[in-house]
Image (cartoon, rainbow, N blue to C red):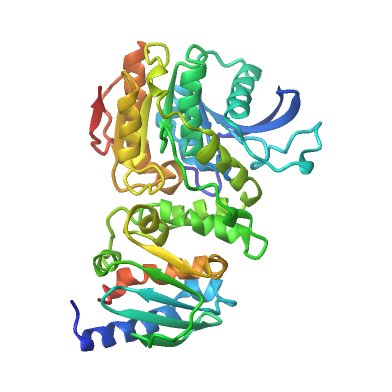
Amino acid sequence: MTTTTDTESAVAEFRRLSDSDPEIQAHGRYFSCSFLWDMEEKTFLFRMHRGKIEELVVDPGPLEGYDFAVRASADTWREFGRPVPAPMFHGIWAATFRRDMRLEGDLLVLMQNLRCVTRQIELLRTTGPLV
Amino acid sequence: MPTQTEISPVTGHYVTIEVEGARYRVFYLENGTGQPLVCQHTAGCHNHQWMGLLEDPEFTRDYRIIAYDLARHGKSDPPMNTEWWKEEYRLTADHYVAFIVAFCDALGLEEPIFMGSSFGGNVALQLALRHPDRFRAVIPVEAADHSPGFFLDWWQHPHANAAQVCASGVWDLMAPQSPEHDRWRTWFYYSQGSEAFRGDLYFYSVDHDLRGRCGEIDTSRCPVVMLTGAYDYLTPPEAGRRTAEQIPGAEFIEMTEIGHFPMSENYPRFAGYLRQALDLVARRTGMAEASAPRPRSPGAQVRRR
């Protein structure tokens, strides 16, 4: 388990990486939506606007709205945060088909932004686990 | 691999075939001489997936490698003489098998080895079951007796960019170790085939169902060597192994650090495993050039029943 300071620093690093990522900036001109990463021990609410993280809220309140959610156990998310993830922890499709990940909410929004969301989750391989 | 100033030895051709009353002009790439090795691309894709193999002299020395585009893919058009736009495209096992046999007949191929990946791997199992004397052997790559769950409406949803959804939906089927450039090339191929992808997956996830029938495959007439990558979330190694265990005499090779598109996401790594598979086929069928030491083999474990 990470401490609050660790989380804050990892979140700051994640924001910096995402907002400066060439792939996201190349594909994300219309990447504007909101989504939740539910890591069991912590949750992260992203509000994206034209490819940039407008807001990243750690442990948002219960009535915060978002388009879709990616949920899994903390252990699964920690596996996503390895530099080279093991099989079935290497993407949201893999972990949804074969592990405990769940995709919930308006999945059309996920599909509309699939390339950028996929890339963002892969940035965890650089930052390390957020929980 | 050729440099930018070299002309590839791979050549492209068109052949017209008739399948179940419909005429198709089929595009295929080929290179090499010797034992024909017919290669099927994955669903929603095209024959560029096999360019690494087509240009590899280690294989083209002994094999005539032929990689075709299935109708509605790449440079193979939909049927020439039917109003195909008036019905939803759903590929069936019957049609798929008939198409491949007609293509091999049109080229006059005698006892080709058939290799396909994903929905091409599943049809390889169908060919072994239905036409064991037409093919010298089959190499199903990323195949299983049953592969449910991918016949999805997301591939053609009008509110999402289908090219992006198809290409990025299959992204996770590739291993993180595979070279980034080759993964992106595979992604690019997938941005080109979205209109056929969903219909292909009708075969892959619905019409192809050999549960309880794999035992009918006669490997004494048509040897089966299955290859599956560890990062394939659709037909993971346990699915390939489970399938091979139901086929008396079948071989199964698990490929590590590679995924569902081994021939295009990381051809050099795939080549070692393919060499093992072809050597097994050669031994099983008495072909002359079997089993010289192969330095590129990554040392896969071979399981034989």
Residue at the spot x=30%, y=39% of the render?
A: B238
In this rendering, the count of numbered labels is 0
Instruction: List the single residue furthest toward the front.
Output: A63
Query: Which quadrant: the N terminus of chain A?
Result: bottom left
Q: Quadrant of the C terminus of chain A?
A: bottom left
Q: Which residue sits at x=67%, y=35%? A: B71
Residue B259 in picture, x, y percent from top left: 38, 47
- Give the percent coordinates (x, y) of residue B272: 32, 36
Q: Would residue B256 be found to the left or right of residue A104 on screen? A: left
Horizontal side, residue A62 vs residue B159: left or right? left
Q: Quadrant of residue A15?
A: bottom left
Q: Quadrant of residue A118?
A: bottom left
Quick check: can you spot residue B274?
no
A74 and B112: which is toward the camera: A74
Residue A4 appears in the figure: yes
In the rendered view, would you say B177 is above or below B251?
Answer: below
- The one of B81 and A46 positioned closer to us in this rendering: A46
Residue that appears at 30% across and 53% down: A87
Q: Of residues B214 and A14, which is closer to you in this image?
A: B214
Q: Quadrant of residue A83?
A: bottom left
Q: Position of residue B261 (x, y in %)?
A: 44, 45
What percent of the width, then of the height, locates residue A44? 36, 80
Task: Pick the residue in front: B270 or B170.
Answer: B170
Q: Residue at x 43, y 72 (%)?
A: A69
Residue A19 vertical placement versus B134 (above, below) = below
* Residue B164 shown left or right of residue A34 in the figure: right
Locate residue A14 relative to residue B7 in the image: left or right. Answer: left
